[in-house]
Image (tube, helix red, strand yellow):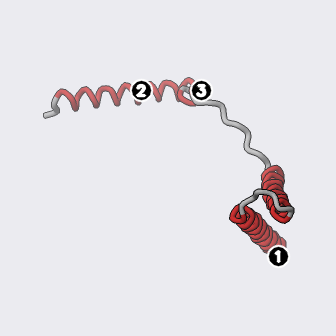
Amino acid sequence: MIDRTSAANIQSMLETIRAYQSQAATGSRGLEETTAPKTQMPSFTDSVKNIIDQVNDAQTKSTSLQEAYQRGEDVPLTDVVLGMQKSSLAFEATLQVRNKVLKAYEEILNMPV
């Protein structure tokens, strides 16, 4: 025997299913209309350009910190070293990604058609 809470839950689920069936039959979008509109994803070229700009900014900041330290300005040595390491790491990561992309491109070129 089904108790009252289970019967109510089953009835509620059946009503939900029927509502979805009627929405599907009429072609309305229902829940999708209530969600926020999707923003357009940036293209691959834009993504690569943004990443290269970020790496360039890190290297520029690192260079400016080094020059400020060499001029005797009040710049902590730890900030200079951290800036140098961040820019070096960003450059190495970008270089590795470039190498992987080139390797994948070469593999695609060598695929038999």
Q: Find residue 52 and report its horizontal and vertical position in percent.
A: 82, 58
Question: Label 1: which residue?
Answer: 110
How many C-alpha atoms fall within 10 Å of the one at disc 2: few (<14), some, or many (≥20)? few
Please state which of residues 45 and 66 is positioned toward the viewer in this rendering: 66
Q: Quadrant of residue 38?
A: top right
Amino acid type, label 1: Asn
Question: Label 3: which residue?
Answer: 33
Q: Secondary structure at mark 3?
A: helix
Q: Residue at x 29, y 26 (%)?
A: 11
Query: In whole angstroms, how far apart are the C-alphas of marks 2 and 1?
Result: 53 Å
Question: Label 2: which residue?
Answer: 18
Please state which of residues 61 and 112 is positioned toward the viewer in this rendering: 61
In-image side of 98 versus 26 (left or right): right
How many C-alpha atoms fall within 10 Å of the one at disc 1: few (<14), some, or many (≥20)? few
In-image side of 3 versus 33 (left or right): left
**Residue 28's mark?**
none
Q: Earlier in the sequence, mark 3 or mark 2?
A: 2
Q: Is residue 64 above or below residue 24?
A: below
How many C-alpha atoms fall within 10 Å of the one at disc 3: few (<14), some, or many (≥20)? few
Q: Residue at x 35, y 29 (%)?
A: 14
Amino acid type, label 2: Arg
Quadrant assignment for the N terminus: top left
